[in-house]
Image (tube, helix red, strand yellow):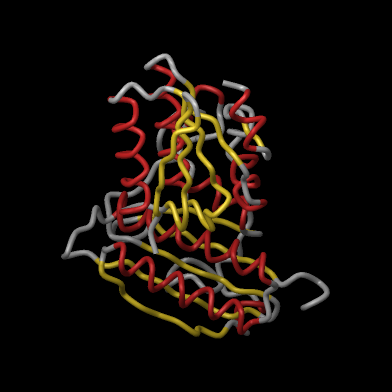
């Protein structure tokens, strides 16, 4: 199963609720296209909710980094919400935990933009 | 990184006592496709479960094997219909050994390959090997003959299971 991405607007923040697996192929390209589309439309405050993401491979992690960079280059920010233990571990191993702002609480995440 | 050469393909060294007791449970030549990766990951996960690995270790072994297979298909064989990926899984007395070998142009590990170094942290790719290393107990990456890269990874059962 690949990733399903649902976007919703909360104030000026776009929340992306991701569900499933973000892996090389459909999952990672769906995420890339979603971020690209949002940035091109001027949405520069993105909050990626990973609570329902069961698996991210190294390609998916690469897409998170790429998304972070492209949003930052556009003057915005991409933050992460509700990581599972496994995804926390992946970010620790790849030393990306300090790169991303990570939140457990959506209200706090929204207020941080 | 440490590895005994015992269960490598022929010509790679003397066989250790441990490896003489290794039992090959899967030996396949896979097409260079992502479908092959998905199916093989599922098979390895099933074998790890059968071998008695706990859930988290099973996930980690499956993850490592998937990354090795993706490297072989994408970076090694470059999705070539004419090239195959060797996948060999052996049950060890207290763990599992997986060999993934491609028919690509080979792989040279250098400074640019270290995805965890400061200057490479924001690169889009290159994290696969670091994750394989983190999720296994032993890892060797070496050149294969006549061409290609061979990845040998091992994961051992935790003491309470072994």
Whether residue B29 is visible: yes
- Quadrant of the rendered structure where residue B146 is? bottom left
Q: Position of residue B116 (x, y in %)?
A: 56, 33
Whether residue B120 is visible: no
Q: Taking A24 as reference, is B44 above or below it? A: below
Q: Residue at x 28, y 25 (%)?
A: A40
* Residue at the extreme left: B82
Toward the viewer: B56 or B16? B56
Q: Residue at x 38, y 63 (%)?
A: B101
- Left or right? Give the position of A25 relative to B50: left
The number of numbered badges drawn on the structure is 0
Toward the viewer: A80 or B153? A80
- Quadrant of the rendered structure where residue A16 is? top left
Q: Position of residue B87 (x, y in %)?
A: 40, 71
Q: Position of residue A37 (x, y in %)?
A: 29, 33
* Residue at the extreme front: A11
- Left or right? Give the position of A21 relative to B148: right
Q: Quadrant of the C terminus of chain B?
A: bottom right
Q: Position of residue A30 (x, y in %)?
A: 33, 47
Toward the viewer: B52 or B114? B52
* Residue at the extreme top: A75
Q: Taking A12 as reference, is B44 above or below it? A: below
- Left or right? Give the position of A3 relative to B48: left
């Amino acid at each position: 199963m690949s990733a399903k991405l649902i976007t919703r607007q909360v104030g000026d923040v776009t929340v992306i609720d991701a569900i499933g697996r973000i892996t090389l192929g459909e999952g990672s390209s769906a995420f890339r296209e979603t971020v690209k589309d949002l940035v091109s439309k001027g949405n520069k405050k993105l909050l990626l909710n990973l609570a329902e993401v069961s698996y991210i491979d190294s390609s998916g992690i690469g897409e998170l980094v790429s998304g972070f960079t492209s949003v930052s280059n556009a003057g915005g920010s991409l933050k992460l919400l509700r990581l599972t233990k496994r995804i926390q571990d992946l970010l620790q191993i790849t030393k990306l935990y300090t790169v991303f702002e990570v939140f457990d609480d959506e209200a706090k995440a929204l207020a941080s933009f | 990184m440490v590895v005994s050469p015992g269960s490598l393909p022929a010509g790679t060294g003397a066989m250790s006592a441990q490896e003489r007791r290794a039992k090959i449970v899967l030996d396949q030549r896979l097409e260079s496709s992502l479908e092959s990766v998905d199916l093989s990951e599922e098979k390895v996960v099933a074998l790890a479960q059968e071998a008695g690995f706990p859930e988290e270790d099973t996930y980690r072994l499956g993850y490592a094997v998937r990354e090795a297979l993706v490297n072989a298909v994408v970076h090694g064989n470059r999705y070539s219909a004419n090239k195959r990926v060797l996948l060999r899984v052996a049950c060890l007395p207290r763990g599992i050994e997986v060999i993934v070998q491609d028919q690509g142009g080979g792989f040279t590990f250098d400074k640019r390959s270290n995805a965890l170094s400061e200057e490479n942290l924001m690169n889009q790719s290159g994290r696969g090997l670091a994750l394989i290393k983190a999720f296994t107990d032993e890892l060797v990456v070496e050149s294969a003959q006549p061409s290609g890269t061979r990845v040998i990874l091992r994961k051992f059962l935790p003491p309470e299971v072994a």
